[in-house]
Image: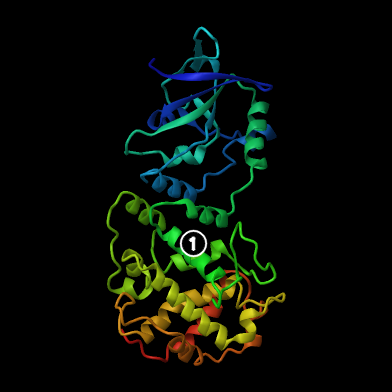
Amino acid sequence: MSVISMPCIRVTQPIGEFFIGAIDAADLVNISFADVRRPDGRDIERYIGTERDLSEGRVAEIRKYVTNVDACFPTSVILAVSPEHAAFLPKENGNTGELTITKDREIAKIIDGQHRIAGLEHYAGPRFQINVTVFIDMELEDQAMVFATINLKQTKVAKSLTYDLYDYAVARSPQKTCHNIAKLLNFRDRSPLKGCIKILGKATNIATEAITQAAFVDRVMKLVTRDAMSDKDLLKRKKTLDRAKGVDQRRLIFRNLFIDDEDARIAQVLWEYFSAVSTRWKVAWIDRTQGAILGRTTGFAALVRLLPELVIRITDGPLEKKSSSPSKGDFLYLLEQIPLQDHLFTAETYLPGSTGEGQLLQDLLEPVRGTMPRW
């Protein structure tokens, strides 16, 4: 029987010994398995078994992520291996050495990392090693305790923080551009969104902050790209992005401006648009009382989805044409065709979440549809 050999470090902690090393992704996929739940098993077996269903959506994201030029899994996959399938051969100091694991199907039980492993199935890119923590002859109760410690006590990273970290990115990306525009609109004097966005790390007027940084970036980014992660990867590889053409130009209204490095014009269009919104619905836009929704995520999201429909009714062609930037007055003319009054923008009329957002979009869009598109 062949084996996988890896240099490793022996670590001693109160729980006992374990070994840290690195293994090729293909070998990890081959030898690992998620515990099969036994119908008549103990509660603890059910707890750490396949009752933890794989999220196919998350696996698909990881499968795509591992093809990126900067793909990285810096934290260990944790495995439990029985002693008949693993052995540690120490060097002179006893803390380093070589770990050998039987190279056979399903001999390493996954304690943590099954989504990463599933995402690496069929990986065919350059060498991808995964750092692993291997427990040998680990009691089932200890496996459960390690699993619980990792999965129940870790703090989830806020999406807004993830976008805020694009401040440190050197390469262009849709994420970085939309993050920078959010900051500009939130902090620039006379901006219609000044103080409205919860930007991490910056103390502003908490009473006015009603749109999260993540909500702003996510919604605006949908006017730039269908796949932000792929665009980011291509730009980091110094490759050219596909321009929006045909129908895509009517939906991805900012894509070609982004490709042409005209982020300032994207910000200008948003500035003019929300200036018109703040004029059309003066009271509702700044209302931060409980139940008010226009200046919060529900209203903001619906307004961003409305924007392409307004742009194609104002301009003679795509925004990358130098003469095609709409003004506040252009937007205001169309918004004034919408009969909704300030007092109607409430959570009672438009429920929080996608349902209320969709209904609000329809109510904003219906009057505009009577205005003929110009392209």
Residue 318 position by quadrant: bottom left
Q: Note whether 111 is above or below 85 in the view shown.
A: below
**What is the x, y in percent for residue 233?**
36, 51
Point out the image quarter for the N terminus.
top left
Residue that protrudes farthest toward the right in the picture: 290
Residue 290 or residue 118, whichever sits in front = 290
Rendered view: 350 above or below 176: below
Q: Residue furthest top?
A: 92
Disc 1 packing (10 Å; few <14; some 14–19; many ≥20): many
Q: Quadrant of the C terminus?
A: bottom left
Asked whether residue 255 is in view, the answer is: yes
Which residue appears at 39% of the width and 73% of the height?
Answer: 265
The x and y percentages for residue 33 are 49, 32
Residue 342, above or below 289: below
In the rendered image of this protein, does residue 118 appear above or below residue 160?
above
Q: Residue at x 64, y 31 (%)?
A: 146
* Residue 365: image location, x then y, percent: 48, 84
- Give me the residue at 47% from left, 27% from top: 106
Image coords of residue 312 (percent x, y)? 36, 82
Secondary structure beneath label 1: helix
The quadrant in which residue 136 appears is: top right
Type of amino acid at the residue the image marks with label 1? His
Can residue 41 be seen in the rendering of this structure? no
Q: 31 or 113: which is nearer to us?
A: 113
Q: How is the image coloured?
A: rainbow
- The answer to which of 38 and 320 lies nearer the viewer is 320
> Which residue was labeled with disc 1?
179
How many numbered discs, if any?
Answer: 1
Write the residue at 63% across / 40% down: 151
